[in-house]
Image (cartoon, helix red, strand yellow):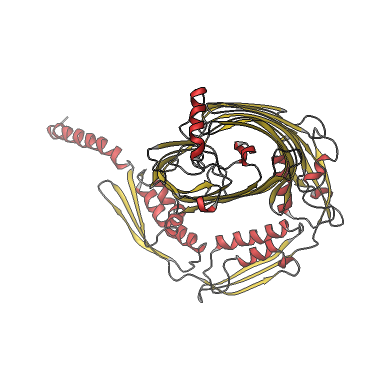
Amino acid sequence: MTRAGMCGTPALIARVGLLLVLLPSLGAANVLTTQIDGVDDPLKSAVAAAAEITQYEKKDVTAAQARRLYTNASEQIVKALEGYGYYNAKTDGALDETAQGWSAVIHVHTGEPMRVSEFKLDLPDPARDEKPVAAALAAFTPKAGQQFDSSAYEKSKAAVTSALFASGYLDAVNSEHRVEISRSANRATVTLKWQPGARYRFGEVVFKGSQLDDGFLDRYIPWHTGDFYEQNKLLRLQQKLVDADYFAVVDVLPDKDHAHDGIIPINVTLLPALRTIYTAGIFADSDIGIGLKGSVTRRWVNAHGHKVKVEALLAQRQKSLAATYTIPLPGENDRSYNFGAIYSDTNTTTTQSKTTRLVANETQQWLGFTRILGINALTGDFIVATFKNSSTLVYPEASLERKHLDDPSFVREGYSLLLDARGTPGFLSDTKFLQVRGEAKWIHGIGDNQRFITRGSLGATAVDDFSALPPELRFFAGGTRTIRGYGYETIGPPLPEALVPLAIENCKRNSSLNCSTLILGGKDIAVGSAEYEYYFKPNWGVATFVDVGDAFSQVSEFRTHIGTGVGVRWRSPVGMVRVDIGVPVNDPDGKHGVQLHLVIGSDL
């Protein structure tokens, strides 16, 4: 080997080594970053989703990949914007190599949106006049003069077709749906046509899987055979069967395969629910104390759909046992006969009573209300303001109740109404009386995290012998459900001064009697409340309230009692928990102090 060759060897080795070091980096991937501007949400989100390049954000790519992604992004973005009515969109920008890899900047120029210049829709009467169809047509977008949006256009088409199906036009076809685009004029012409076909009518309803007698479930069908088919009536039937509480599964479907001559049968598939239900739990209520409650429900006693329920409550200031037997009746409006017996033992700071009540009534849906007509037999012993008495009353009773709410677990918009009346001419009773009462509650959501709640109660009684009315037929105020800031049932007409010494003497003879609140209860009541709630977290909120009213026996004796305070609200897994602290304000009797109010239960 020559000297020159030997001298070149180290240099060659060095160059090969450097090449080996550089080879990995020559083929190495580099991080890609992307910036898109010129549009705001929702267009920006749509553009980003359509552009494949955004899927490689902050990922390693080769130079060839970066160039391909950047080149394709323009076409992908322009195509995506067409769906929103921008048919003349353009993009520009740059793809630059940086120390970290590749940086893509894309500027989007949407241009003017395309508008509908002509809107033609052909849907013959009477189909187009059906309420669901008319509503879908009125809400159709885009119409003439509006920006063309293909997504809204497709949804509107589907809404009209669905409305036709829901109205009984089960053979309806969208026979023509054409959008003609003029990019140069930036205008679109929309042409639509539906052929509704014949309107179907309800045929036979077939129940499958029921454990009850044939024909019994017909009482829940909210239509007659031959009526025009309506989807919302199928939903009503399904809901009524669910509410009947006989079945774990309810599936209501039109049988299109066996429809003929415009008549469509309805198949209802059912799966029986668990026949007997047992419930038990601990509860806390500041009015009656901490306690236990439980129930046993027999969802169906026999194949006629009869039901029975037994409930028990054991609390610090109240004990009760109730049994109800329900006989559903054939026909519409969810009619049923109900028979019940209730034993109650109550011991509060105001009253003590042990009564038994027998009830027989009929319930049904009437003009949007639940109507109850029945008769009661009430008998028992009681002590009010230390004076003992007993009475037996047999009286008819009528009530109307209505509730409307958007969400049973947390009402944002809703109300409840209750009107009832009871009385007796004295036959089989210790006194004659007539009593009427009305209660209302309204809940209104404000924004996303606030609620306003107002409620009111009015009641009046005409009676020959007030002393013969047991406490449950007298009016008291004070407590969680009337006027917070006061103890439970501590507001009402006081014992006449002439009887106070005798009441005190009664307490001396019987230490179990309470002389701290000598309240007789009133013939009348008027109570109102306003409450504001603010939720700082989805399940936690604070509240402030003002309650006002009185229980009285003559209008001239009405005295304004005001309670106000603050509270905490918790949407717990077992229901709404309300904890309030209230105080009296300028009480006419000079009462003062702080009251804690706790209740768990639904809003309405």
The residue furthest right is 261
Horizontally, residue 368 falls left or right of residue 211, namely left
Q: Residue 130's x, y, as percent?
A: 72, 64
Q: Residue 580's x, y, as percent?
A: 43, 39
Q: Nearer the viewer, residue 135 or 448?
A: 448
Q: Is residue 510 visible?
A: no
Horizontally, residue 130 falls left or right of residue 24, namely right
Locate the N terminus by quadrant: top left
Locate the C terminus by quadrant: top right
Q: Nearer the viewer, residue 484 or 217?
A: 484
Q: Is residue 521 visible?
A: yes
Q: How many marks?
A: 0
Q: Nearer the viewer, residue 313 or 119?
A: 313
Answer above or below: position of 199 versus 460. below
Answer above or below: position of 591 versus 415. above
Q: Residue 380's x, y, as percent?
A: 66, 30
Answer above or below: position of 574 versus 433. above
